[in-house]
Image (cartoon, rainbow, N blue to C red):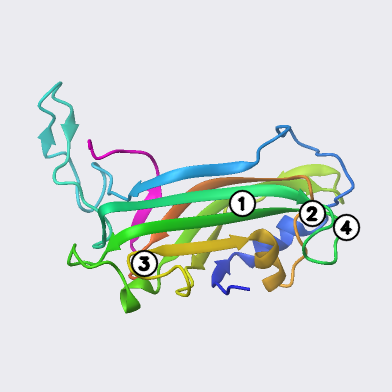
Amino acid sequence: MKKFSMFLAAVALVAFTAGVSNAEDCLFDSPAKAKGIKASMVRAVASCVGSVTYPGTNTTTSTGGTPGCTPPFFYSAYSFGPKGACSYSNKGKTEIPCSDGVEAECYNLTQSVKCKDIVDIDEVTPIDGAAATGWSLQSVTRPTVNDITAGVAITIFDFPVQSVFPCIKGCGKGKLKFKGDTNTLLAGLGLPPLGVCSSLAPQTIVVSDPDGNQFAVLGGGGTGS
């Protein structure tokens, strides 16, 4: 199995999984189906106002005179090539039996990221070798689960996860690829899988470069071509 590094608030996860029963109905409002997310990503750019880069606006749009900042400040020195793109997806499902090989059933969320034509800081050379290592997927998730012991639903405080892209097959030549799931994450921390009644709401999803700077975030856009 592919290895990836994860740094997580363990206290949150202990509360996240403790007392969760797979045999109970959900104790909170939840949709009948919410299979996951499939989305494109755009470059991460600094806020126009209130950031270190732009304490205030420095221009207005030609049409309408809307205040703005120019030039856009991208956190990462890396960039997309002519065919550059990143996409993110996650997909959750109830597993019967659970893929951990122990529990009768559980909820498992798989997430993946694919990027292509990312170029180095020279804005020409596709990332490869050292430039293709150290990239990461950073996320902040807000979980809601059954707390069967207390007989209530509970929303755990937002917790961060950092998953380092494994630079093996699918890495280099401008490409990045990552895939991981909650069962693997929790097992690595010695914790049981999630109960079948679980809701995971992503608050932040970011692809960061080897220097730890934000490179891409969820969004949509075009080049006009």
* CB atoms of marks 4 and 3 within 8 Å: no
Q: Amino acid at mark 3?
A: Gly
Q: Amino acid at mark 2?
A: Cys
Q: Quadrant of residue 56?
A: top left
For the N terminus, the image quarter is bottom right
Crowd rating for badge 3 (residues with CA inside 10 Å; few <14, some 14–19, many 20+): some
Image vertical order of residue 188 relative to residue 220, above or below: below
Of marks 2 and 3, which one's residue comes earlier in the chain? 2
Give the CA distance from mark 4 to mark 1: 27 Å
Residue 214 part of the magenta-drawn span: yes
Of marks 4 and 3, which one's residue comes earlier in the chain? 4
Give the CA distance from mark 4 to mark 3: 39 Å
Residue 61: mark: none
Crowd rating for badge 4 (residues with CA inside 10 Å; few <14, some 14–19, many 20+): few
* CB atoms of marks 1 and 3 within 8 Å: no
- For label 2, the SS is strand
> Residue drawn at (33%, 62%), measured in percent from left and top?
213
Q: Position of residue 48 (x, y in %)?
A: 23, 42
Q: Position of residue 69 (x, y in %)?
A: 17, 41
Q: Amino acid at mark 1?
A: Phe
Which residue is under mark 3?
Answer: 212
Which residue is under mark 2?
Answer: 106
Give the residues in magenta: 212-225
For the C terminus, the image quarter is top left
Which residue is under mark 4?
Answer: 104
> Residue drawn at (51%, 66%), measured in percent from left and top?
163
> Residue drawn at (70%, 62%), measured in percent from left and top?
183
Compare residues 136 and 66 and report the one nearer the observer.
136
